[in-house]
Every structure is written in structure tokens, then in C-alpha cells.
Image (cartoon, rainbow, N blue to C red):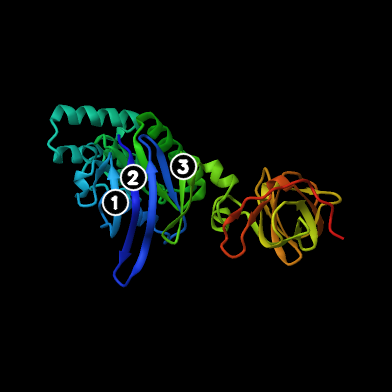
Amino acid sequence: MAELTLKSVGKTYSGGVDAVSDVNIDIKDGEFIVLVGPSGCGKSTLLRMVAGLETVTRGDVMIGGRRVNDLDPAERDIAMVFQNYALYPHMSVRDNMAYGLKNRGESKAVIEERVAEASRMLELGPYLDRKPRALSGGQRQRVAMGRAIVRQPAAFLFDEPLSNLDAKLRVSMRMEIRKLQQRLGTTSLYVTHDQLEAMTLADRLVVLNGGRVEQIGAPLEVYRKPASTFVASFIGAPAMSLLDARIEGGRVLLEGHALAEVGNAPGPVTLGIRAEDLRIVETGGLPMKEDYVEELGAQRIVHGLVGGQVLAVVDTRDTPLTNELHVAVDPQRLHLFDTQSGRRIEKSLQRMAEPAQ
């Protein structure tokens, strides 16, 4: 196990295209870090630079205090789990798991011991003599994880390992990966575009956008205090509603309705409100016209219009909805962002304000 550090790491492809720009991350020994962001944000490129599968244009990659920029992947003491499993189809499960150890020249006794231990952890004992084609997707992914575990590396690297699995299996495999990592205590760097996967797995999230780090923090910290409108809209389901608002006379105004009193300077702002921080009430509150409803069973998501702007509300009641709704807003749960930069504005909320006249 080891610490993993990225110091001002960048990657520029021919033609001057920056895939990754000035990334700084300090990963503690035994920590589970998840790189999350939309397709094309640079997360897989960053992981591949750590693995040695992509050259580093600038900056330093450090594993266990050792600079590894110029080392081959085999010399970096890492193990990688891929999206497509990368198993040898002509080999049995046992031989797939043992392959890396045989290449390193480990003794037969060591190989048998480690393969047996990993197969017990992953419940692969009954499948050791099968070929990959005789396994389900979840079983193949466990074999890929077993192949990584037997190497006892300083760090695990996961490149969207659950993307090829169905929704139900992804949930169970997500739990297996987290429990396994906690049991082994191995430093782990995990890439996904799935924000739910990221929230449930990570000790800390690294949110990437356009090759740059938008925010680093514990999952709930990132969720509750997004650093930018990008993070606010990416982390959370449904996404945070982002609306054009103003601060006038010490009040936050949305379509002429005052939602809270603040100590911030006057001017335009982007107002962020999470759907679960709102509730539908019979009278008072913010007027909203129903647009459409998503029924999810235990709850429903009501999408409506405040003026010409879209607002989503999580509703857990079965009461009939009318076209004209009223929504209660908790001022302590509001988020303010700069309209130009999209960066978070720390606000000084004082009390719920009366509706503007």
C-alpha cells in the first residue's frame, strides 16, 4: 500500500489539445478516491497516466513517494481493473488470476496460496476451472478483481469496471468492491461517469470538467456545498435546479418573490435549489405551474415552471396535484453562484423573507 500523489499533472495531445490541465491530488494510504465527470472530461486519461498507459506531458506522478513518470506499467506496483474485464479467453479462471504472478516468477506455492485466498474473498471457488465464456458478467468482473488482488499491489486502479453490467448487478458489485477495498485497505483510484456510483463508493470525490478539477471533497460535502454550477448540476439526482435570480435590498428575489434575506451585495445571481429541499404546500410559498411528473414509486418528482424557469420538487405524498402549485422554500438550503464564473458564493442568510410586493 502507498500514498499516490499527482503534482500539476497535464496531458496535451498533438495539435495542442489539452486533455488534462494542472491536476493536483494527494491520495492517502488506503484511501478510496473516485474521479467522476462526464464523458470527455479527462478522467480516464488521468487514470491511464497513473498506470503508465499514457505519457505525462507535464507534472509528476508519485506512488509511495517515488516518481514514476518514466517507469513502465509493470514497474509501478499497481493493478488495474478494466471496463471490458481483459481476461484471456483460452485460460481458466485459475490461470487468469495466476498469470501476473507467473510472469513475475513467483513460486508455485505462493501462486496457489494467493489464488485460493482471492477466490475465497470473491466466492470464485466453484468457477476456478471454467473459461471466461462460461461466466456471467458479474463473475467475469470478480475474476478481473481477483487477478488484481493476488498481485498485492501498492494501489488499485479501476477504469469504469461496472459499465458493462446491468443496473441490478451494478448495485451489488458496487457493494462488493467497497467492502473488498475496506477489507484490504489498498489505496484505490476509481473512474466513473455515474455520480451515484461515485457518491456511494468514495472516501473523497474528484469532480472533473474539461480536464480540470472542479472540486475535491467527501461525497456529502460535495453534494451539500457544490463549488460551482457544474458540480451542482452533475452531482445529485435529480440535478439541482439552477435559476436566474437577483439580490436586491438584501433579499434573494426569484421572479419577483423574495425567498430569503441575505447580507450579500446586490446584483444578479444564479440560485440553486435541490428538489428534496422543497415541499408542496396548500397555500403560501412560491407559486409554480406543473409541467410534468415522474412517478418513482416511493416518491415522485414534480417538474414545474416558476415564471419561465424550470424547478423540480421531490414529493412523497399521494395527494392529487393541480396545475397551480405552491412550493415552500427553506432559505437555509438555498445555494448562490456567481452568474459569470459559476463559482459558489458563500451567503449570509438571516431569515425567511416576506413575498415581494
> Which residue is tagged 3?
204
Q: Position of residue 337 (x, y in %)?
A: 62, 57
Q: Residue at x 80, y 62 (%)?
A: 256
Specify whether residue 4 is in view: yes
Could you tell whether 284 is left or right of 161 in the image?
Answer: right
Answer with mark 3 or mark 2, whichever residue precedes in sequence. 2
Callouts 3 and 1 close, C-beta under 8 Å: no
Q: What residue type is disc 2 on?
A: Thr
What is the C-alpha distance between the residues marked 1 and 2?
8 Å
Quadrant for residue 126, please give it.
Answer: top left
Callouts 1 and 2 close, C-beta under 8 Å: yes
Specify whether residue 90 is in view: no
> Which residue is tagged 1?
60
Asked which secondary structure carries label 1, the reply is strand
Quarter of the rendering occupied by the N terminus: top left
What is the C-alpha distance between the residues marked 3 and 2?
14 Å
Q: Position of residue 150 (x, y in %)?
A: 25, 34
| Label 3: few (<14), some (14–19) or many (≥20) C-alpha neighbours in 10 Å | many
Q: What residue type is disc 1 on?
A: Asp
On screen, residue 82 above or below 172: below
> Which residue is tagged 2?
5
Could you tell whether 295 is left or right of 83 in the image?
Answer: right
Q: What residue type is disc 3 on?
A: Arg
Quarter of the rendering occupied by the C terminus: bottom right
Could you tell whether 135 is left or right of 325 in the image?
Answer: left
Q: Position of residue 276 (x, y in %)?
A: 68, 46
What is the C-alpha distance between the residues marked 3 and 1?
21 Å
Answer with mark 3 or mark 1, whichever residue precedes in sequence. 1
Number of numbered discs on residues: 3
